[in-house]
Amino acid sequence: MHNFSIVEKSDSIPKTRISGKVIHGNQIGRTIGFPTANLLLHEEVFLPKGVYGVHVTYQNQLYYGLMNVGVRPTVNKEEIIIHYEVHIFDFDQMIYDEELDVEVCHFVREEQLFSSMKHLVLQIRKDVETVQRVFHLEQPAILKREFKPSSEEYIHLTDLAFIQLCEGKHGINRGVYNTIDNWIYNQGIKNILERRRLLLAFLESIRDHENSRKKFGPGGLRPKLEEFFFGKVEEKTASNL
Ligand SMILES: Cc1cc2nc3c(=O)[nH]c(=O)nc-3n(C[C@H](O)[C@H](O)[C@H](O)COP(=O)(O)O)c2cc1C
């Protein structure tokens, strides 16, 4: 019996679900920046060798990642055993002996023999980008540059204390606070601490005199936010319209 179910066809690969126990690998993955969970499958699966974009379920949480199915010729040319190893995005937990469920979503490429580990790493970086695009996990544009406020310790305050800090220290009222926070949220930043970090960086950038109430002209906040986070946009003059 095989424990795979064909859910739908995608890139001519049947969607396959596999599950297994995480076992020890050679630990090379960690040293090259791509730690992998090596799976001992509970049942045989028919999945062609290659690299796949996957959904991973661990303790009822859904993660995204990449799975390599193959003999890993770059590591060992003589290998004949097929390995199933999953690199999970944004995941850093020790999960040896734990159970993982993997849903194979799409085929990325064939497994290849690289002339060095460095070439393999460069390729895996491209694989990560490919899969993040397919899963729509690209970094929000607002995070393309790094914005760090000088007063990062404040981001861990309670909601009320944080808002009061913004009012007292940066002279904005609750309405302005909400407008900025909503604007940042709409750029794709769902994480509250990340939003607070960006909000503080913005407030520090527009700070003039201590405790002066901020007034935003008829143009309002939006152009100021866009200018700070995305850079100044050249004004179009009538002649080049
Ligand atoms: C996304 C991904 C793609 C991979 N592609 C290849 C490949 O094309 N050729 C190859 O020889 N090994 C490939 N590997 C396997 C790596 O060589 C292996 O993960 C690494 O050596 C770490 O193994 P370890 O966890 O057992 O130490 C890939 C691994 C991952 C996670």
Image (cartoon, helix red, strand yellow):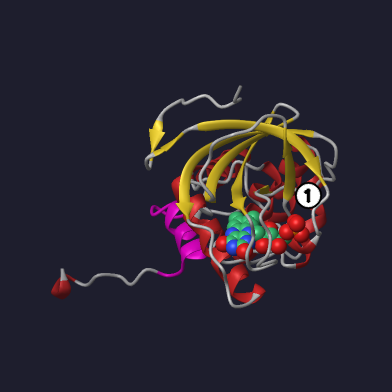
Find residue 142 and report its horizontal and vertical position in percent: 52, 57
Ligand 1 contact, mark 1 (Cβ < 8 Å) = no
**Residue 190 place in picture, x, y as percent:** 60, 41
Query: Residue 7, image x and y in percent?
Result: 46, 25
Report crowding for label 1: few under 14, some 14 to 19, many 20 or more residues within 10 A (C-alpha). Answer: few
Where residue 211 appears, as percent x and y from the top left, is 71, 57
Asked if one can make out residue 207 in the rendered structure from this viewpoint, the answer is no
The image quadrant in which ligand 1 is located: bottom right
**Residue 23 appears in the picture as rendered:** yes
Magenta segment includes 201: no
Residue 223 inside the magenta-drawn segment: yes
Identify the residue at horizontal 59%, vertical 34% (top origin): 45
Near-viewer residue (15 or 44): 44
Q: Secondary structure at mark 1?
A: loop
In the image, taking residue 5 as reference, residue 240 lies left or right, namely left
Quadrant in the rendering for residue 114: bottom right
**Residue at left offset 68%, top offset 31%:** 19
Residue at the (56%, 68%) spot, across then down = 113
Answer with left or right where residue 200 lies relative to residue 158: left
Q: Is residue 19 above or below residue 215?
A: above
Q: Quick one: 76 or 115, which is closer to the camera?
A: 76
Horizontal arrangement in the rendering, residue 120 relative to residue 38 (left or right)? left
- Read off the residue under disc 1: 92
**Where the N terminus falls, by quadrant?**
top right
The residue closer to the viewer here, 95 or 160, is 95
Q: Nearer the viewer, residue 70 or 182?
A: 70
In the displayed structure, does residue 20 sit left or right of residue 173?
right
- The quadrant holding residue 32 is bottom right
- In magenta, the rendered stretch is 216-232
